[in-house]
Image (cartoon, rainbow, N blue to C red):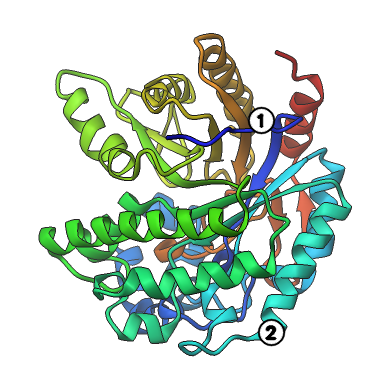
């Protein structure tokens, strides 16, 4: 049975980040994988069309694929959060880097835990609601070495991490256990182009089942200490259209959510893709169809849970389409609300330009542009338009 869910006093507006993509100085399974595969990624980039390589010459440089110092958000978070506050954000999603707080099994780094305590306190000081993600695709090397999510006791290791974080941060209301389990499992265990680089349908399904079990375990662990917490996952949904759309929706959008239901207090929705023909494309070649957000939101009504849009965005280095995309997707969200979807928030991906996994640094998703040489921040024009949308919102 679903617990009583207390709606936030205000609609959650803001943006999101992930630790490995912005903090810098991480040491986890991804940092090891980057160094091993950077040359291969350069070779792949050299095979891309000339027009792409001319627009983004950094994609052919090895350093593009090494996360390194990232945006130095680990040390610059106060300035970054002040930018968010100045843009009238009242919520911010970020992830705790598991490998920082538990660098060896059962060994806790109190300095790293204090850092995230300071991060949460800084957000609260600025009246920005923290939305904490516990697993955003990177894991400690010791966990990876034991087989990661394929280990039969993976959920127990994750539970211990979760319990330690909840004990340290009992004032956090919003928790996301796992980010995009279908995306992670498909890249890591089906396509094999992310760590651990497997290509096996059985292992893909095994990973999904393990992540579902780990989520449910974490869900109960969080509620044991914070009964009124809002706990969910960030689920990646695609707006499918056409004859076989119902089948695609089930396997990609619904299978995992069905498996963890009813152990989620809200659905975190990440929306980027549609198979609908699009007039515009992002720098990564993704078709831009903001109208699809309405359809994936309405689809989620079947779970009878509130929805927080935990990611939506596009790679757009020249800031040509971002303002239009945000405005159009907000209108799609509004239409979904009018159709009865209980939406609690909209978090743009991303607050900052960041390290986009196997693509590296060349895709630019940020409301805030980062000069990677100097780490200078420059707020893009679209960020101010987003601020105006926030200020004018009413339902």
Residue visible at 61% across and 64% down? 166
Residue visible at 66% across and 45% down? 15
> Which residue lies under the disc numbered 2?
110
Dividing the picture into quadrants, the one containing residue 193 is bottom left
- Under circle 2, the secondary element is helix
For residue 57, above or below residue 326: below
| Contact, mark 2 vs mark 1 (Cβ under 8 Å) | no
Label 2 Cα neighbours within 10 Å, binned few <14 / some 14-19 / many ≥20? few
Instruction: State whether residue 376 appears in this view.
Output: no
Mark nearer the N terminus (2 vs 1): 1
Residue visible at 40% across and 26% down? 300
Q: Is residue 25 left or right of residue 284?
A: right
For residue 146, above or below residue 298: below
For residue 279, above or below residue 321: above
Image position, residue 52 (x, y; %): 42, 52
Instruction: Give 89 or 41, whichever is nearer the viewer.
Output: 89
Instruction: State whether residue 204 appears in this view.
Output: yes
Q: Is residue 303 left or right of residue 367?
A: left
Image position, residue 296 (x, y; %): 40, 26
Label 1 Cα neighbours within 10 Å, binned few <14 / some 14-19 / many ≥20? few
Instruction: Give 220 or 329, whichever is nearer the viewer.
Output: 220
For residue 150, above or below residue 180: below
Question: How far is disc 2 from disc 1 in space, using C-alphas?
Answer: 33 Å
- Under circle 1, the secondary element is loop
Image position, residue 89 (x, y; %): 77, 40
**Residue at the extreme top of the image, as rendered:** 338
Quadrant showing the N terminus: top left
> Which residue lies under the disc numbered 1?
7
Quadrant showing the C terminus: top right
Instruction: Give 92 or 349, whichever is nearer the viewer.
Output: 92
Residue visible at 45% across and 24% down? 297
């Amino acid at each position: 049975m679903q617990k009583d869910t207390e709606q936030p006093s205000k609609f959650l507006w803001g943006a999101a980040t992930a630790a490995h993509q912005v903090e810098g100085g991480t040491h986890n399974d991804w940092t090891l994988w980057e160094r091993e595969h950077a040359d291969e990624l350069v070779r792949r980039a050299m095979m891309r069309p000339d027009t792409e390589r001319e627009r983004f010459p950094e994609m052919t440089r090895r350093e593009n694929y090494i996360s390194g110092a990232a945006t130095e958000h680990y040390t610059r978070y106060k300035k970054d959060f002040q930018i968010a506050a100045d843009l009238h954000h009242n919520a911010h999603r970020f992830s705790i880097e598991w490998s920082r707080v538990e660098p060896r099994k059962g060994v806790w780094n109190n300095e790293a835990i204090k850092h995230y305590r300071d991060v949460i306190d800084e957000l609260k000081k600025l009246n920005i609601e923290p939305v904490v993600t516990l697993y955003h695709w990177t894991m400690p090397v010791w966990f990876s070495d034991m087989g990661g999510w394929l280990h039969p006791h993976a959920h127990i290791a994750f539970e211990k991490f979760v319990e330690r974080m909840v004990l340290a941060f009992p004032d956090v209301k919003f928790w996301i256990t796992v980010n995009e389990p279908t995306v992670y499992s498909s890249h890591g265990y089906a396509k094999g182009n992310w760590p651990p680089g497997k290509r096996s349908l059985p292992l893909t399904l095994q990973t999904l089942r393990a992540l579902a079990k780990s989520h449910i375990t974490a869900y109960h662990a969080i509620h044991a200490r914070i009964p009124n917490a809002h706990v969910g996952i960030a689920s990646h949904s695609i707006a499918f259209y056409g004859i076989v759309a119902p089948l695609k929706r089930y396997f990609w959008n619904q299978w995992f959510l069905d498996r963890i239901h009813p152990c989620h207090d809200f659905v975190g929705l990440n929306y980027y893709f549609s198979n609908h023909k699009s007039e515009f494309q992002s720098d990564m070649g993704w078709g831009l169809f903001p109208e699809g957000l309405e359809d994936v939101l309405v689809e989620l009504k079947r779970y009878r849970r509130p929805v927080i849009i935990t990611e939506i965005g596009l790679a757009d280095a020249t800031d040509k389409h971002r303002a239009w995309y945000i405005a159009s997707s907000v209108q799609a969200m509004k239409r979904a609300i009018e159709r009865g979807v209980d939406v609690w928030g909209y978090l743009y991906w991303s607050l900052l330009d960041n390290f986009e996994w196997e693509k590296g640094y060349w895709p630019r998703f940020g409301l805030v542009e980062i000069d990677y040489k100097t780490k200078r921040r420059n707020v893009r024009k679209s960020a101010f338009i987003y601020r105006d949308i926030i200020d004018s919102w009413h339902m």
